[in-house]
Image (cartoon, grey):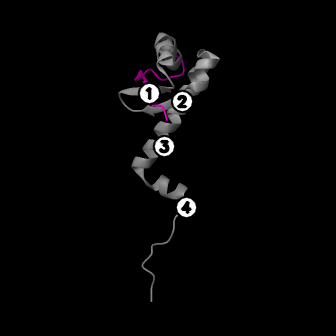
Amino acid sequence: MASSTPPSVPLGTALDRSAPLTGLLQRVRESRERFEAVAGLLPPGLREGMRPGPLDDTCWTLLVPHAAAAAKLRQLVPALDAALREHGWPGPAIKIKILPRA
């Protein structure tokens, strides 16, 4: 009797075959690259608690642990925008989001 289970495919191959997932992975990668490009502009105490967040056509989100970090980061947005433009990323706008407490 023949098996009705389709053959397994390595995860990397499955991701490469899916256009939506490939696009998502590309955006995740670009978000990390953007964060690396601006990390040197961030004070060490601020940088340690931050994470790169989602990137879409309208904004790139930076995730921070608390309101004080968000306030400080908002002051740095013009410098971060300038650094991103220097690295070839003229947009989209930077959005700051406070991570919910666990």
Between circles 1 and 4, the one closer to the viewer is 1
Find disc 4 in the rendering and name its residue.
10
Marks 1 and 4 sit apart, C-alpha to C-alpha, by 31 Å
Residue at image point 56% right, 30% down: 33
Amino acid under disc 1: Thr
Marks 3 and 4 sit apart, C-alpha to C-alpha, by 16 Å
- Quadrant assignment for the N terminus: bottom left
Marks 2 and 4 sit apart, C-alpha to C-alpha, by 29 Å
Between circles 2 and 4, the one closer to the viewer is 2
Discs 1, 3 touching: Cβ within 8 Å: no
Amino acid under disc 4: Pro
26 to 46, vertically: above or below:
below
Q: In the structure shown, which secondary structural element does the residue marked by tag 3 occupy?
A: helix
Find disc 3 in the rendering and name its residue.
25
Between circles 2 and 3, the one closer to the viewer is 2
Residue extent of the magenta highlight: 86-102
Which mark is first along the chain, 2 or 1?
A: 2
Which mark is first along the chain, 3 or 1?
A: 3
Find disc 1 in the rendering and name its residue.
61
Marks 2 and 3 sit apart, C-alpha to C-alpha, by 16 Å
Q: In the structure shown, which secondary structural element does the residue marked by tag 4 occupy?
A: loop
Find disc 2 in the rendering and name its residue.
51
On whether residue 48 falls in the magenta region, the answer is no
Which mark is first along the chain, 4 or 1?
A: 4
Which mark is first along the chain, 4 or 2?
A: 4
Q: State the image coordinates of residue 29 (x, y, percent, origin top left).
A: 53, 37
Residue at image point 58% right, 19% down: 46
Q: State the image coordinates of residue 92 (x, y, percent, origin top left).
A: 40, 24
Q: In the structure shown, which secondary structural element does the residue marked by tag 2 occupy?
A: strand
Marks 1 and 3 sit apart, C-alpha to C-alpha, by 16 Å
Amino acid under disc 3: Leu
Amino acid under disc 2: Arg
